[in-house]
Each structure stands twice: as C-alpha cells, then as structure tokens.
Amino acid sequence: MLNSPNGMFSAWITVDGVETPEYHVETSTDNKVVACWIASETGKKFSIHWKNFAYAADAKGDIEIDGTSLSGRFLYGKKLPACATKDGVREGEMVRPFVFSSLATTDDDDYLHHSSSEKLGTIELSIYPIEVLPSTGNVKRKRAQALDNITVHERSKKAASVTQQIALVSKIQIDPETR
C-alpha cells in the first residue's frame, strides 16, 4: 500500500483480490507524486483502490491506464475514512474487468514512430480536490468504453522491458452494493 507523504491518502492494487507488493517506491521532491512498480501476470484480473484517511473536503481519483483516461471515483470528506475501487470499465449494469494482457509487437516500420508506447505499462491515479454541486437531474458522465489494444514496433518498446498492456475481459454483472 502506497501512502501519500502527508498521510491523508493511500493507494494499492489487488490481483485476484490479493494486495500486490510495491517495489522501488519513490516520492517526488515536491511530495506530490508517489511511484512504484508491481509484478503482473498475463491473464490476471486486477483492481485499483484508494482511500482518504484525513482530507476533510471532497476529492476525486481519476485513473489513466496505458495512456488512456478512464472515469474515476469520488471520495467524500464528510465520510472518513472513505474508500474507492476501480476494477474495470462500466457498461450499463455490467463491468468489463481489467486484466493484464500480452503486448502485440511488430517489425512493420509504420509503427516505429507511434507514441502509443510512451505510457505503456503505467497505471496512474490522480487524486485532487473537487467541489460537489447540487445535481440538476440530467447529469451525463463521459466514460471511456475501451482500452485500445496497442501494437508497438519491437525497437520502440521501453528498453524491451514492457511486455504487457491492460485489456478488458468479458462483461460481468455489477454487484448492487458497488453501484
């Protein structure tokens, strides 16, 4: 579990329901970014979790996976501690869970200068303050509906260390308690 330098937030990833250990944890000099890496295994489902321990105002956590922005979750400061989980992409009353997937590579030079691999292998959680306003009734949420299958040129992979990407698996029914 990663903790923010101020101790107000923590974040962690579970694989098949088990918290994963973090390696090479680093904090930026301005104490605003905490980074690490985790081990992954192709075909394993995972979830992203974050918790507000002490920030008394409302906050939102947004997710970016392999460079694709996904909708996040709210943490309300009046209900501390507050936890949020993102385990996939919602489609109505269904969710398509996150899964570690193999990365497609090619020798086709048309892919040599694509920038899609720049954030490949990253799962980013950004937590920031928000102000919750009264609803007008017709709120439409913009949600990413897919994670692109990325193909990269063999020579453009991050020093040949990135071999996986994140994909979505078949839809499953959402637990009514998590809606």
Image: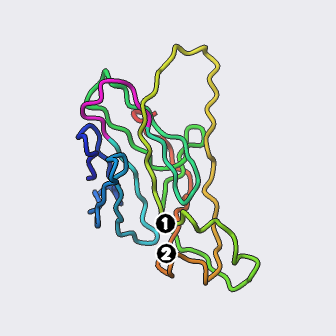
Q: Which residue is mark 2?
A: 162
Residue 32 versus residue 179 in the image, above or below: below
Residue drawn 62% across the image and 46% down it: 144
For badge 2, the amino acid type reads Val
Residue drawn 57% across the image and 66% down it: 118
Residue 120 versus residue 126 in the image, above or below: below
Measure the alpha-carbon separation of dots 2 and 1: 6 Å
Left or right side of 2 for 127:
right
Q: Which residue is mark 1?
A: 121
State whether the magenta stretch is mostly helix, strand or loop.
loop
Q: Are marks 2 and 1 in contact (CB under 8 Å)?
A: yes
Q: Where is residue 151 shown, x and y percent of the image?
A: 65, 73
Q: Where is residue 179 shown, x and y percent of the image?
A: 46, 33
Residue drawn 61% across the image and 76% down it: 104
Q: Where is residue 66 shown, x and y percent of the image?
A: 54, 60
Residue 155 versus residue 20 in the image, above or below: below
Task: Give the structural element (helix, strand or loop) at label 1.
Answer: loop
Report if residue 58 lies within the magenta region. Answer: yes
Q: Indicate the quadrant where residue 109 lies.
A: bottom right
Q: Which residues are magenta?
A: 51-60
